[in-house]
């Protein structure tokens, strides 16, 4: 009997499924732009029929489930889990991400108002500059109204907004909510929570928002031995360092890797040339000061002299079979190069671990074997190649083994990703490399996934960036047309920054030590900031004049703004301890509207940090810094912190405003630190 019933049910299900599918197809046509259906009364009918059938389908499926499991109980619909909300202000710390809590609050409200909607969109955005629109907005009412319509439930966005509002629990985060316009929910942040956060910042510093800790591998800088480190590598160095800094700040376990190009056929000619030029290089370290000139010389011989070319190839074979003399020569060349690179890293205060392509030699053998055994490699004119998608075969395949049996850049990157997954146990794999290499990394990702090296959610995060252009919008070169040496570039930055400080007469105010600190902070800070403040995927024009401008969104402007803020407490002759004592006595309270406006900007720090650490676009942090300093300027124009009489004697100090200055300075300092920019107390 049960069997017969089940059969019946199954048949009916199949029929219902078919009907539903036919209707879905019709609907699909409509959604794909088949406009002939618009205004057709059959449309509404189809929608409602579709809904009814879907409903019937669910009932039938549940009946089958109940039948086959032998239980007669009707299936109970699962209770929706709503987020737990913060109710106690004292459980909040200075690192709270306000927008995340707002998302929770509205997920709760929408889930309560519309329990039958699966995954309703929770849209929270920052309101514009107009205070009429509140501080944040919840813009979920419009899409929810659409969803309801699709379910044949009559509603309009305003009504939905009101329903959401009615279900919004009271929260220490929200002062009030207003329904506006077509169905926007304007949210006004509660001052008390903001004051609490300011208190925390003053007492405990600018703490990072809590996140699940991960092991992150950041591959950046990565120049090639014996070749010049060019402006592209400089971009990678600056962006990669900043990415590492933000992830370290969040408490992640970050491995900063310099994937040096230190293995390949170019070493053949370098070694052959070394043997000729410095025959006793093993006992007397040769004075190679200009490795690039050395490279050029050997390249010239390689191109012009057949005998030399043959020897160079023989050297490669010797090197690859680990012949000690050849390894010694190779090491020597690498060392000279590395010392050159280190000069740049020292100046820019960059730490990273050198782990070049040579590190993966044995691992390349292993990964090639794995790929061969797995049947992933195909022969192609003597080479062994691998496609990311063996059916489509689009794009360019990896060359895993060359026709002479040697390995390539592709092979070392396959070995590297395997090492980073299996040995380093990474959770995130970030590569900061010029946008020109994006296809290479897309293919590495696809092949590593195909071979089972990358699993499920593991993926290569390619952080690409555009090329550096000169002010003429052409490739960045010196006046005489040569490529620019990075050390020369940094030197010029130093010179220009000093000129700028002298132009402003700072040499007369600052001590020689202070002047030097300011000079370096400005020079290196402006080079880094100019790079980081532009959307990295775009090409960017390198201009000392622009980056050293003290107006606009530049490092110079921000460093000045910061020293000005720092000087306010100095003028008031108030130490930080005194300020803390005041916090203990009176706490922090927002007064003037401009104070509150600045406070709300500062409150967004955790939100910005979380965003940047996800999408790895640092220009958002730069924009945020600029926003802080603009809000601060407005505050400082409107609100005095220290009142003096005609003789210049201090007659009144407004402590809460000094506290706001302190909090502003701290958030700015932390942000600049993440960007790798040194701050100075005077400049
Ligand atoms: N050495 C390469 C270049 O100069 C960049 C290496 C990037 N990292 C990597 N794992 N392939 O273009």
Image: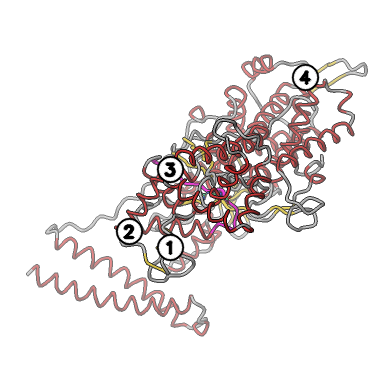
State which region is magenta: 425-438
Q: Determine the CA span between mark 2 and mark 3.
A: 24 Å
Label 1 vs 3, first from the N-terminus: 3
Residue 244: which numbered mark, if any? Answer: none
Give the alpha-carbon distance from disc 1 to disc 4, as whole Å.
71 Å
Identified at 51% across, 54% down, the residue is: 313
* Residue 400 picture location, percent across and down: 42, 58
| Residue 76 in the image: above or below residue 262 | below
Q: Nearer the viewer, residue 494 or 537?
A: 494
Q: Which residue is denoted by mark 4 in the rendering? A: 570
Label 1 close to label 4 by CB (< 8 Å): no
- Answer few, some or many: residues within 10 Å of disc 2's Cα (few below 14, many 20 plus, some between 14 and 19): some
In this view of the protein, can residue 602 be seen by the observer?
Answer: no
| Ligand 1 within 8 angstroms of badge 3 C-beta | no
1 or 3: mark nearer the eye = 3
According to the image, label 1 marks what residue?
403
Q: Earlier in the sequence, mark 1 or mark 4?
A: 1
Name the one closer to the observer, 400 or 634: 400
């Amino acid at each position: 009997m049960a069997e017969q019933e089940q059969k019946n049910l199954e048949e009916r299900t199949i029929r219902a499924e078919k009907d539903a599918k036919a209707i879905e197809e019709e609907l699909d046509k409509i959604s794909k732009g088949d406009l002939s259906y618009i205004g057709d009364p059959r449309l509404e009918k189809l929608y409602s029929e579709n809904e009814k059938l879907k409903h019937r389908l669910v009932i039938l499926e549940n009946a089958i489930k109940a039948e086959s499991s032998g239980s007669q109980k009707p299936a109970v619909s699962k209770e929706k889990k709503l987020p737990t909300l913060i109710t106690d202000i004292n459980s909040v710390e200075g690192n709270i991400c306000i927008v995340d809590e707002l998302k929770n609050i509205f997920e709760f409200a929408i889930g309560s108002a519309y329990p039958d909607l699966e995954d309703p969109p929770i849209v929270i955005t920052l309101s514009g500059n107009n205070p009429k629109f509140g501080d944040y907005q919840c813009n979920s009412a419009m899409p929810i109204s659409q969803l309801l319509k699709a379910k044949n439930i009559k509603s309009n966005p305003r009504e939905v907004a009101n329903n959401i509002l009615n279900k919004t629990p009271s929260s220490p985060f929200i002062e009030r909510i207003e329904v506006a316009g077509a169905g926007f929910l304007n949210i006004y942040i509660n001052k008390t929570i903001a004051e609490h956060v300011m208190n925390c910042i003053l007492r405990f510093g600018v703490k990072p928002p809590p996140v699940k800790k991960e092991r992150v591998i950041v591959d950046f800088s990565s120049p090639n031995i014996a070749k010049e480190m060019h402006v592209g590598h400089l971009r990678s160095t600056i962006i990669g360092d900043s990415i590492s800094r933000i992830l370290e700040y969040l408490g992640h376990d970050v491995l900063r890797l310099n994937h040096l190009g230190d293995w390949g056929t170019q070493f053949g000619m370098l070694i052959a040339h070394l043997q000729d030029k410095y025959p006793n290089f093993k006992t007397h370290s040769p004075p190679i000061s200009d490795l690039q000139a050395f490279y050029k010389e050997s390249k010239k011989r390689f191109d012009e002299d057949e005998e030399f070319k043959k020897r160079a190839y023989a050297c490669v074979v010797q090197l690859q079979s680990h012949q000690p003399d050849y390894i010694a020569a190779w090491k020597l060349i690498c060392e000279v190069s590395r010392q050159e690179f280190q000069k740049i890293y020292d100046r820019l205060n960059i730490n990273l671990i050198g782990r070049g392509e040579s590190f993966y030699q044995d691992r390349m053998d292993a990964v090639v074997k794995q790929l061969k055994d797995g049947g992933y490699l195909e022969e192609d004119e003597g080479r062994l190649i691998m496609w990311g998608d063996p059916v489509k075969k689009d794009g360019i395949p990896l060359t895993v083994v060359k026709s002479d049996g040697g390995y390539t850049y592709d092979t070392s990157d396959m070995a590297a990703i395997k090492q980073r997954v299996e040995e380093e146990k990474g959770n995130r794999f970030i590569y900061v490399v010029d946008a020109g290499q994006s296809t290479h990394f897309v293919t590495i990702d696809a092949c590593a996934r195909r071979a089972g090296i990358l699993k499920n959610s593991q993926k290569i995060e390619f952080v690409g960036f555009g090329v550096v252009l000169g002010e003429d919008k052409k490739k960045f070169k010196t006046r005489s047309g040569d490529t620019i040496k990075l050390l020369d570039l940094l030197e010029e930055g130093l010179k220009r920054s000093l000129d700028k400080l002298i132009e402003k007469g700072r040499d007369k105010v600052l001590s020689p030590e202070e002047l030097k600190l300011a000079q370096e902070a400005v020079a290196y800070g402006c080079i880094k900031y100019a790079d980081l403040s532009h959307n990295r995927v775009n090409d960017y024009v390198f201009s000392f004049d622009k980056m050293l401008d003290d107006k606009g969104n530049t490092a110079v402007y921000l460093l000045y703004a910061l020293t000005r803020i720092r000087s306010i407490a100095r003028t008031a002759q108030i130490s930080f301890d005194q300020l803390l004592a005041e916090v203990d006595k009176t706490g922090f309270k927002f007064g003037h509207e401009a104070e509150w406006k600045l406070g709300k900007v500062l409150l967004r720090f955790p939100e910005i940090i979380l965003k940047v650490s996800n999408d790895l676009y640092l220009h958002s942090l730069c924009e945020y810094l600029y926003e802080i300093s603009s809000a601060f300027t407005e505050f400082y124009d409107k609100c005095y912190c220290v009142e003096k009489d005609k003789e210049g004697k201090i007659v009144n100090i407004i402590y809460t405003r000094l506290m706001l200055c302190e909090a502003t300075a701290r958030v700015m300092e932390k942000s600049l630190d993440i960007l790798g920019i040194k701050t100075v107390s005077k400049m």
